[in-house]
Amino acid sequence: MKNYIQHDPWCIIEEGFRPKYNRISESLCSIGNGRFGQRANFEEFYSGDTLQGSYVAGVYYPDKTRVGWWKNGYPEYFAKVLNSTNWIGINVELDGEKLDLARCEIEQFQRVLNMKEGFLQRTLTAKTTGGKRFRLDSIRFCSIVDDKIGAIRYAITPLNFSGKIQFTPYLDADVENEDSNYEEKFWIPIEEKANNQSAFVTVETKKTAFQVCTGMSFDLFKNGEKQDLNSNTLQRDKYAECVVEVNAKDEDEVVLYKYAAIISSMNCEKDDLMQTCASSLKQAHEKGFDPLKEEQKKAWAAKWEESDIVIEGDVAAQQGIRFNIYHMNQTYTGEDERLNIGPKGFTGEKYGGSTYWDTEAYCLPFYLSTADQKVARNLLVYRYKHLQKAIENAEKLGFKDGAALYPMVTINGEECHNEWEITFEEIHRNGAIAFAIYNYIRYTGDKAYIGEYGLEVLLGIARFWAQRVHFSARKQQYVMHGVTGPNEYENNVNNNWYTNYIAIWCLKYALEAIQQVRSEDESRLNAIFDKIKFYEHTETNRWKDIIDKMFYPVDEELGIFLQQDGFMDKEQILVSDLPEEDRPLNQKWSWDRILRSCFIKQADVLQGFYFFEDHFDEASHRRNFEFYEPRTVHESSLSPCVHAILAAKLGMEEKAYEMYLRTSRLDLDDYNNDTEDGLHITSMAGTWMAVVQGFGGMRVKDGALYFNPMLPKGWTSFSFRIRFRGAILSVKVDKNGTTIDNHSDIQVPVYINEESIL
Ligand code: BGC
């Protein structure tokens, strides 16, 4: 755990440069706008340790996989979101001396992510090896108003010398992914252009043939006065630069404004890329840096108006929650149904930028409550569009007749994961995708979704479960063998309770969904049945038989559901018995030792209690929580938030708060020692859930909102806004109780502690 980020309600502040934490700060202070994103790398050349990262949403490369022993059914490739054209680059020479902070004596340094207004700022004073003192001030942002645009204000002030200040703004697509499997470069050159005041680089991905065109233009000012440009240009494959210089003396401030436009062939015909890029760039340039920054500020104010959570009395908690909300908002905007949310968003390469069950299980509630309904809907439509691929994916594993198995990891619907125990066995993901449909409709009331898109997905998923279980002659019950539950610290288990439970729930929900569409629009139902060749009588009779005769492992003596067959035969030790130096287990223990232990990576049985809490009474809830939480090491970032919500429901305030802090400051304090790889974007939505559903106790039942709030001890108050079925509500919890206001004309029933208040 690290503790070098200053506590502040609106900013992430790194005071003083720590080269060994540079990658961590680069992740923390990443900026983005849903269309592209950028790690907080320095603009100028830096020879120290850094992970360069500029990412363009949806643009990926199918990297050949590496596996030890190839198994039938493995995917051929792992899709990777690519490190793309570096648009921020500005090299600097101070009177002939190349600027490299790794070789400077740094006197003062501050890197700040301003979350309120959506920009990154760096200020520093330093001395070069040649003894030149200077000040550097830079500000940059990815516009959320025009998601093609990035802008930088980059200022140098000589402090003890006079001479030429030379800037080389450049575009560089000759970049690599650190995590490429075969040290291959993924981009091929298409076109480069450079002139006095602008440059363009177009490149294409190998194999997938996405094109990205990046343009830059710039202005140079000295002490507020615009300078004539006389650039020297250079172009080579995948690279273009312009070199400009100006004479400056002590205390003269020289500023380079750099504007960038980034457009991919996802959003524009290839033949029009350059022209569209140039006209967007021109528009941004003509508007100018300050107006662009001003509109950015306004747009972020609007986002905060909708999604902020205010915590009074605890700055660390306030900063933590805003940090999470900020990154969620800049990762996914819901405008493009082809896009989704990678576990690292635009902040690193790990996990390839692809989609996991994280989206449905963890991210959806945040967007449901803080954005227009279409944002959450688009997340569901993404899976609808991948249904055919999910059917093909199941076919590769031997399933048939339209059974659909959604991939564990995907970018275009095809499975990208290749560890048999996860790819083939961690099939509970299918359940989360069905649950998200239910969750969306429960929240929004948009029942039409079922007929339009939902039913087909539910039928494909139900068909899968019906084929995946088998009948045990000895038990005279259906069982499910060879699975991995959410707890990836044990594989190939039989009858994982969570998987069995969600599978049966999917069958029941699919049956309900059929009836719903039948009652609303029978012709639509018939059209779907025809399209997918659904033999209702035969198929649903089998589903009903499975529902009636499914086996669920329980331990009668303890009164708990068993994580899987035989779980109680394991040596039962608690996490509190583990020596501190053994943690995290995944870095300290052999995999074999982890698999044999009773330690649980993340909510498993308890994930079921989270999704289906109304199915169980409170006593059962408590028994299961008290049994499983002490055996859980929370080594997935997705774990603490679910535990925070369950603990809050059970009134276990201290545990809820401990879990909340862990989720909200996971990256800021680098709990898992891996922030340098990028941020845990998908678990950030879980942090929001921990406040709203945990401390706020918000639930939706039968079209009404219920709150059972709990104010953590150290907080004076907390408040948040939510959208619900067209209404906008604000909720404030303080020592005097809970206040809920409806800021719209739309009436919604609201209950606090089971009492009707609106
Ligand atoms: C977790 C999975 C999750 C994945 C991506 C893994 O560590 O165990 O549940 O889907 O990370 O966030």
Image (cartoon, rainbow, N blue to C red):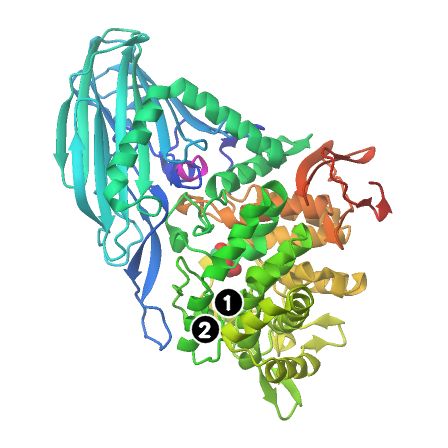
**Could you tell whether 737 is left or right of 304 in the image?**
right
Would you place residue 134 above or below residue 323 in this image? above
Front residue of 464 and 43: 464
Q: Quadrant of residue 170?
A: top left
What is the three-letter code of the residue carrying label 1? Ile
**Could you tell whether 464 is left or right of 446 in the image?**
left
Q: Quadrant of residue 622?
A: bottom right
Q: Position of residue 478 (x, y in %)?
A: 63, 84
Residue at position x 67%, y 51% from top? 443
Front residue of 614 and 106: 614
What label does residue 99 carry, if any? none
Front residue of 49 and 244: 244
Q: Is residue 611 within the magenta segment?
A: no
Quick one: SS at disc 2? loop
User: What distance separates the C-alpha of mark 2 from that of mark 1?
Assistant: 20 Å
What label does residue 424 carry, if any? 2
**Could you tell whether 134 is left or right of 621 in the image?**
left
- For disc 1, does the CB lie below 8 Å from ligand 1? no
Quick one: SS at disc 1? helix
Residue furthest toward the bottom? Answer: 473
Q: Quadrant of residue 393?
A: bottom left
Residue at position x 48%, y 76% from top? 402
Residue under label 1: 594
The stretch of residues the image draws in magenta is 26-31
Q: Quadrant of the C terminus?
A: top right
Residue at position x 25%, y 20% from top? 128
Would you place residue 265 above or below residue 295 in this image? below
Q: Is the residue marked by circle 1 packed among few (<14), some (14-19), or many (20+) residues within 10 Å?
A: some
What is the three-letter code of the residue carrying label 2? Phe
Q: Position of residue 330 (x, y in %)?
A: 48, 39
